[in-house]
Each structure stands twice: as C-alpha cells, then as structure tokens.
Amino acid sequence: MLLACANAVIAEDGKKKHMSEITTIPTNISLRIGATVVNGPKWQEELPAPLEQYNRKVRLEGLPDHLNPAVIDTEKVAAFLKALPQFPAESLKPLAGRTIWLDYGGLLLGASAPTRPAMFTGPMKLEIVEVQGQVVHARLVLKVDCDLARNRAAEASARIGPTSDEIKALEARLSAVAGTPEQERDVLTALSVARRRRSALAYVWQKNATARAECDGTDAAAKADLEAAVRAVDLYGMPLGTGMP
C-alpha cells in the first residue's frame, strides 16, 4: 500500500506549504509503471496494485529489494506524487498531456537509490531528460543521503565476489550434467538468476558509488570505488528488463 508522506513540502522557491494547500496532479498528466498507465489525479486508488505487481515481477531470488535497481520504493513514490502538484507551473507544463515514467532511474524512486521518502518533501527540481512519444523521462535534482550511498555501494560491491563464485560453481556443474535435460534445465535456471543478481549488484554499486563520489568530492577512495563500479557494470551488466516495450 502506498503510504502518505509528511504533511508539508518545500517548493523550489524555498517556501513551505501544507498538504491542505496542495491541489491534485493536473488531470492531463498520467503515470506509468512498467507497461501500466494510470490516471495521475487518481494515483492513490489506481497505482498501488500495478506497482505491487511490477515489483513482484522484477524481484530476484536471494536479493533484497534495497540491492535491486529495478524495485520501486512505494513510500518514495507516494512522497514524490504528493509533492508534484507544488512544482512551479513551468516545470509541470512539459508534462501536460503526457505520461511520467515512474520506473525511470533519474527520479531516484528506486529501493536501491540513495534517497529516503522524507527527502521528497524538501527542495528539489524536476528536469525533463527526453520524451518518447507521450512518455516523459524526467529526473529529480535533490539532496541525496550520502551515508546511505556509501553503505549501499559497500554492500553491493561486497556481494559481487561471492555471487561470481556461485556462478563459477554453477558453470562447472552445468558441464557435469551435460546431456541430462532436466538437470541441465535446473542449472541453467539457477545460473540465469545468479547472473541477473550479479548484474543488479553492479548497477546498484555504480549508482551509489556515483552519489558517494559527488558527496565526497576529491576523495581518492570514493573515486577509486566509482571506477571499480563502472568496470563491474562493463563486465557484468545485463538489461534490467524494465525498459520501454
């Protein structure tokens, strides 16, 4: 279930407004999660079911949501959509008659993103990255949680090695069961999940290492961690399966 965010947000002009002053999302703006499009103003009724269905589809066995770049945090979504009507009219104008793609990474709504729900009630800026047909890819510029970024990057990177060892063991097992259809199928299934899990970890490492590097400025360790994360994505990155159809 989508949860309500705090009862006040701070607009781009720095002024704090209470929820009682907030109008609903403009009627000509819709929202998209996965392949499902819902009515923007009715998101509290229409969005929870497809959002939960989407998250069930993208979850990976053996991987917690906060280390899965495809899983969307429902509380962050609620906080963002509560704050959306308060953005300056100029920011909302490009969205008129279009659909906001909620699972686009630039919105920082992912469970693995270095953000917390309360951050979506603070100062932030909405930028349009691109428009594909009627679907808008937008990004939020807001202050991230630097400690969370460091911790997530460290946790994701620490799991890469053990996951790679698991993959090597499965690859060896696959050779051993060659010619046995049922056993081959089982091993191939496990191998596919393990490779997707490693890919997800690499993406989470890179995203949070990027945020860490921005937080820590010229820190050599943060720069080295980001470079290692980029190499991991180059080596292990696979499509997340959440793109446009």
Image: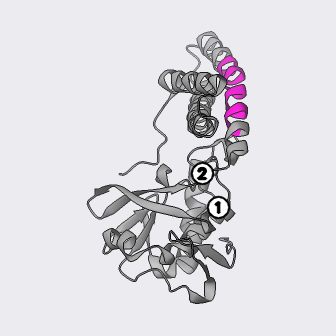
Residue in view at x 38 percent, y 76 percent? 89
Q: Residue furthest left?
A: 133
Q: Does 19 appear above or below 200?
A: below
Q: Does 243 appear above or below 3?
A: above
Residue 85 vs residue 110, the one in the foreground: 85
What is the magenta range?
Answer: 152-166
Badge 1: residue crowd in 10 Å (few <14, some 14–19, many ≥20): some
Question: Element under label 1?
Answer: helix
For residue 62, say whether it is visible.
no
Q: Earlier in the sequence, mark 2 or mark 1?
A: 2
Q: Is residue 233 magenta?
A: no
Give the residue at mark 2.
71
Q: In the image, residue 10 lies at what x, y percent?
A: 59, 72
The CA span between labels 2 and 1 is: 18 Å
Quadrant of image for the N terminus = bottom right
Residue in view at x 59 percent, y 18 percent? 180
Q: Does 168 appear above or below 159?
A: above
Residue 119 - label: 1
Q: Does 2 appear above or below 157?
A: below
Residue in view at x 59 percent, y 34 percent? 217
Residue 67 - label: none
Q: Quadrant of residue 147?
A: top right
Q: In the image, residue 188 lies at what x, y percent?
A: 57, 26
Circle 1: residue type: Met
Main SS, magenta region, reads helix
